[in-house]
Image (cartoon, grey):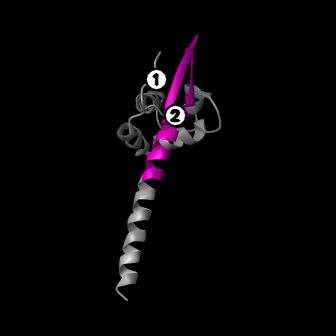
Amino acid sequence: MARRKPDIGRIFDALGDPTRRNILERLGEGPVSVSRLAEPLPITLAAVVQHLQVLEESGLVQTEKVGRVRTCRLDPAAISAASDWLAELRSHWERSLDHLGELLAGEE
């Protein structure tokens, strides 16, 4: 299956929810089954599945079903896309602030 380019808007929308961020932190430790992922969360398994669907649609998480077990893992491509976007934004603001500093220094 061809991979599509990560959608930055969907990625940040998915990251906006604290439960989904918690799920991503847990997946940072390695692949885990949906049922095991849901164990410590104070929400129903159905709610965890809904959160995973948002994460999967954003490209942050991949799932694979083998038999009756669905395993989830982070997708590094989407995480890299978000990181790259933030790095570009930071670079833009650093250049802008450097330019402002130069302008202000010239007024002295």
Between 104 and 11, which is closer to the camera in this rendering?
Answer: 104
Task: Write the residue at 35% across / 40% down.
Answer: 9
Residue 44 percent coordinates (x, y): 46, 32
Residue 106 percent coordinates (x, y): 37, 83
Residue 8 percent coordinates (x, y): 39, 40
How far is mark 2 from mark 1, CA to CA?
10 Å
Q: Is residue 12 above or below residue 36?
A: below
Callouts 2 and 1 close, C-beta under 8 Å: yes
| Amino acid at the residue labelled 2 | Ala
Which class describes the residues within 10 Å of circle 2: few (<14), some (14-19), or many (20+)? some
Residues in magenta? Answer: 61-88
- Left of 21 or right of it: where is 40? right
* Quadrant placement of the C terminus: bottom left
Q: Is residue 36 above or below residue 17?
A: above
Q: Is residue 25 above or below residue 103?
A: above
Task: Write the residue at 50% across / 30% down.
Answer: 61
